[in-house]
Amino acid sequence: MWSTMQDEPLTITQLLRYGTTVTASSQVGTWTGSELRAENYAELGRRCARLAHALRGLGIDGDQRVGTFMWNNNEHLEAYLTVPSMGAVLHTLNIRLFPEQLAYVIDHAEDQVILVDASVAPLLNKILAQCPTVRHVVVTNGPVGAVEAPAHITVHSYEDLLAAGEDEFGWPEIDERAAAAMCYTSGTTGNPKGVVYSHRSIWLHSAQVCMSDGMQLSGADNALVIVPQFHAMSWGMPYAAMMVGASLVMPDRFLQPEPLAAILAATKPTMAAAVPTIWQGMLAQLEAHPQDISHLRQVVVGGSACPPAMMHKFEEVHHVPVIHAWGMTETSPLGSVARPPAGVTGDEAWDYRYTQGRFPAGVRARIVGDDGAERPWDGSAVGELEVRGPWIAGAYYRPDEGDPEEKFRDGWLRTGDVGKISADGFLTLTDRSKDVIKSGGEWISSVDLENAIMAHPAVAEAAVIGVPDPKWDERPLVAVVPKEGEQVDLAQLREFLAEHVAKWQLPEHWAFIEEVPKTSVGKFDKKRLRAQHAEGSLNITDFQ
Ligand code: ADP
């Protein structure tokens, strides 16, 4: 028997319509370096209509891909809403990709139009000649002269195109299962892989972002969106904001601790989201230049493991709760959020908050051992995490090209993350499968060691990798970045660590480094650290 309910598709057009009419007075603002350049959502809606007319004029009349090569800003939000609502597909391009990877993803997705921020045009200029599918480049926030395009590409000014448009657009009916946006993973092995989100997956994910047990984004929020729009869709915040009318603060290119502190002071956001390295930098900034940030009712941290010491510092010194979350490009990205269950307080609550979080109803999870058998949710059995659900990828773009890493198994996404799940559904990750240190048949969690070392007051950052060992297969090597002006003694640091980890896990190889190498999205780049070790460029102290 079928239901008697209406079959209203869950589309981004619906979010655009709601956000820009019912919550028309909410606003999005972009930081210019000294102030906020804001537009309210009514104005946003008019500019989206104008952009849609402009893109129609450039030949976007179906599911063609429109790339964005932009910072987090008003114009990027306009593209986020307009392109999918026209029935086309938004392709967010990571401005930190290597040129050859950038050319690869543009070509692979067959982008026809690219919107580019003038400040990053020089990066795009390098590869446009290798992009045969691109026909138009539209320049935002600067002169068209910023783009040097080969003959097959026409360059336009974003503002001129919008000025020629109209305030209303006849948005088409769209199948909720149709592609709305795509994003390539950074491709730690092989070429980047495309994840294609549907209108439906984005709609349902947005609702999860707004749930009180999710990221808790509400219409009362003024949210600072630090996590880039070109990285896992800013964790879904731009779309979710349209669902509830949350205002947004976009930092544009001002992502260093000092300008971020200025943005906090000027715009007083109620929440913010970013990877741990951003928050580590912010803590150091606040230590040097104290500032009240208690207007933040929460900051959401994910993308890599959040060091507990950092969570404590934010809460105890700055009175701001840090909420730990887990996800990946393939999971839209929100997979789990660490909010303790009802009635849990004190240290027990902290134990819950350190975890990667609890799975929501929309994410099914299982832990699978090396033998392919499912492990129990008992808080101790460890294995690879696999997930499925309505906002989890079931394949990469162009599945006919194969699934080289076998990321999908019987309808489940193999995350490549290793961990355990408690009986009440909280995930604790111990590592990425490729970062686990296999020592004498046992596994050592690089993340546990890093968290323990980063709790030392003189340590700014620490990354741990496994290095080959003739007796044990692998042993941990610790790369330490001391805090500015601090003297750190490696032997003492090792003694400090010995108080927190089992003796057999205690690393014997240590090195000071100036900075932990980071990936294009600000995570520890252990591949590069391993390469530095292999080429002998780390100055290692050995302990026995
Ligand atoms: P990339 O592979 O470029 O890092 P993603 O941004 O999709 O691409 O990263 C997803 C991965 O980031 C996850 O598979 C996991 O390894 C890691 N990750 C995300 N959130 C957390 C977290 N809270 N704790 C530990 N690791 C995390």
Image: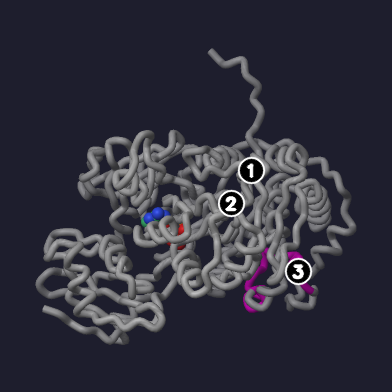
Front residue of 116/293: it is 293
Please say if 474 is above or below 61: below
Identity of the amino acid at label 3? Answer: Asn
Please say if 102 is above or below 242: below
Q: Residue at x 63, y 65 (%)?
A: 263
Q: Would you name the residue on which mark 3 appears?
A: 141
Q: What number of labels is visible?
A: 3
Q: Residue at x 67, y 78 (%)?
A: 122
Residue 338 in picture, x, y percent from top left:
40, 46
Please say if 166 is above or below 468: above
Identity of the amino acid at label 1? Answer: Ala
Residue 511 in picture, x, y percent from top left:
27, 81
Q: Which mark is residue 220?
A: 1
Q: Would you name the residue on which mark 2 appears?
A: 270
> Would you say 265 lies left or right of 488 here?
right
* Disc 1, SS: loop
Tell me if residue 53 can be seen. Answer: yes
Q: Which residues are magenta?
A: 124-142
- Dot 2 crowding, Cα within 10 Å, few <14, some 14–19, many 20+: many
Counting residues from the N terminus, which is met first, the one under dot 2 or under dot 3?
Answer: 3
Identity of the amino acid at label 2? Answer: Thr
